[in-house]
């Protein structure tokens, strides 16, 4: 999977309320009881790599499995979905089902563009098998507005050959061990102060799904938003930012000023021994002939923790009652154990059904590793409507802190920006 969907947090082109959308006719052909044909649903999604191929297979198999519902897919980039969904729904020519990065779900729920799915969660046998943490990211103001198609913990991908050269036999378990290993893996042969090889590629802004720094904050007992209130300016978060700023600036374990894309490039070129990412890093590693390992983010003072990246699938408000019911039939099929296993193994994401057998998970080493890490992960800013503004304020603080500015003052400024965003 490419990382293109992860950063799909562009602001919506259309920001008005989607008034009256639920009463408009859907673009699909209504069918079902008393009709001449099946209910036809349009499904927008942005899966374009191997995950897109397996999703299409699942949809075709669903279509062939019964004669009441037909799903037709339209593949777009995540950014295009974000830019055009509201205007398409307002014009009555949008989809009945749409997938999107999970951090965008609250935005559309707030604009009344999505249909509540609480009845699906309470009444469908397969919905009951969705892991709690994955289901939590679908809740906005106490209501489920989507189902997960992906929920994966951020993890550390590391270059085994560079670890062997440094004589490091075991992956570090704590922050202090992690920094110590990164120092051993950092090489400045000519002594000019700019290493030829870094122990860690640590992004300080525009990170993968913006989840790197929340993962570090979580590991020290911190958070960003709790119960609708900014808590970014906590003593724990100040301590975390000071700790990692020192490791980067003084120990030079990572360059400063890296974005998430920069870290991928540094790691894939063999100039960094470790980076933080998701399952797409397995493809990047293989493409660059890197013998890689996957490990959970080492435990901070408060324990192991990581932010999870998610993708959601939702029923739009354009769907008529029978179309919404048909969409939920597909969701039930999607979360059945065999289909959930097929999706997991084909996409590289941990399974989204607790009923998937361990021996099936073991068929894919990447899935097996990420599944083992998943219990310590948590959704990023679930239910927060203005999550893009919240994460932008965090980004500014982390980038400036690693450049040398005072973490306490920066987090105080971020707190003010986040509090303002939460009130809007």
Image (tube, rainbow, N blue to C red):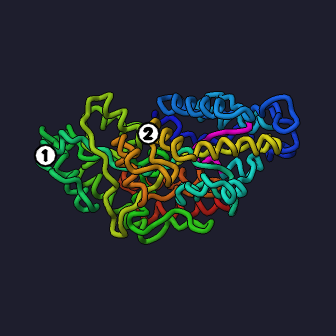
Of label 2 and label 1, which has the lower sequence position?
A: 1
| Residue 349 higher or lower than 139, as above or below | above
Kindly indicate the quadrant of the structure image that contains residue 265: top left
List x then y, in percent, for residue 92.
82, 34
Q: Nearer the viewer, mark 2 or mark 1?
A: 2
List x then y, in percent, for residue 237.
43, 65
Quick one: SS at disc 2? Answer: helix
For image coordinates 65% across by 60% down, the residue present is 422
Asked if residue 42 can be seen in this view, the reply is no
- Quarter of the figure with the N terminus: top left
Residue 243, which numbered label? Answer: none
Decide if residue 419 is on the left or right side of residue 248: right
Kindly indicate the quadrant of the structure image that contains residue 138: bottom right
Residue situated in front as seen by the camera: 370 or 310: 370
Question: What residue did someone put label 1 on?
Answer: 166
Quick one: SS at disc 1? Answer: helix
Query: Start and end of the magenta stretch?
Result: 96-105
List x then y, in percent, for residue 77.
59, 30
List x then y, in percent, for residue 225.
56, 64
- The crowding category of the residue bearing disc 1, from other C-alpha atoms within 10 Å (few below 14, some 14 to 19, many at least 20), is few
- Asked whether residue 102 is drawn in magenta, I would say yes
Question: What residue did someone put label 2 on?
Answer: 345
Residue situated in front as seen by the camera: 145 or 423: 145
For image coordinates 76% across by 45% down, the residue present is 325
Decide if residue 72 is on the left or right side of residue 39: left
- The crowding category of the residue bearing disc 2, from other C-alpha atoms within 10 Å (few below 14, some 14 to 19, many at least 20), is many
């Amino acid at each position: 999977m490419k990382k293109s969907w992860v950063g799909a947090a562009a602001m919506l082109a259309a920001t008005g309320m989607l008034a009256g959308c639920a009463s408009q006719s859907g673009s699909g052909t209504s069918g079902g009881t008393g009709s001449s044909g099946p209910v036809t649903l349009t499904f927008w999604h942005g899966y374009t790599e191997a995950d897109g191929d397996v999703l299409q297979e699942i949809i075709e198999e669903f279509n062939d499995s019964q004669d009441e519902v037909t799903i037709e897919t339209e593949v777009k980039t995540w950014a295009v979905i974000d830019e055009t969904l509201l205007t398409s729904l307002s014009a009555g020519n949008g989809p009945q089902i749409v997938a999107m990065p999970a951090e965008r779900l609250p935005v559309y729920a707030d604009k009344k563009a999505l249909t509540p799915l609480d009845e699906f969660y309470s009444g469908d046998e397969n919905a009951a098998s969705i892991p709690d943490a994955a289901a939590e990211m679908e809740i906005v103001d106490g209501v489920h507005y989507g189902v997960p198609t992906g929920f994966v913990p951020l993890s550390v991908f590391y270059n085994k050959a560079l670890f062997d050269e440094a004589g490091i036999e075991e992956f570090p378990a704590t922050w202090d061990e992690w920094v110590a290993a990164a120092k051993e893996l950092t090489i400045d042969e000519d002594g000019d102060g700019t290493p030829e090889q870094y122990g860690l590629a640590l992004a300080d802004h525009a990170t993968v799904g913006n989840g790197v720094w929340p993962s570090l904050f979580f590991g020290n007992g911190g958070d960003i938003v709790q119960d609708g209130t900014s808590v970014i300016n906590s003593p724990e978060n100040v301590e975390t930012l000071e700790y990692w700023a020192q490791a980067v600036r003084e120990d030079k374990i990572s360059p400063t000023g890296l974005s998430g894309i920069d870290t991928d490039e540094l790691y894939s070129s063999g100039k960094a021994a470790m980076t933080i990412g998701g399952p797409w890093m397995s493809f990047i590693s293989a493409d660059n002939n890197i013998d890689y390992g996957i490990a959970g983010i080492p435990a901070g003072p408060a324990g192991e923790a990581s932010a999870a990246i998610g993708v959601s699938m939702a029923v739009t408000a354009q769907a008529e009652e029978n179309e919404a019911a048909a969409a939920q039939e597909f969701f039930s099929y999607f979360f059945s154990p065999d289909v959930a296993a097929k999706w997991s193994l084909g996409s590289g994401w941990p399974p989204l059904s607790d009923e998937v057998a361990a021996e099936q998970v073991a068929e894919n080493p990447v899935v097996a590793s990420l599944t083992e890490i998943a219990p310590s992960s948590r959704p990023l800013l679930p239910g927060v409507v203005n999550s893009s503004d919240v994460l932008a304020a965090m980004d500014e603080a982390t980038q400036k802190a690693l450049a040398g500015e005072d973490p306490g003052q920066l987090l105080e400024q971020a707190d003010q920006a986040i509090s303002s965003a939460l009130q809007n």
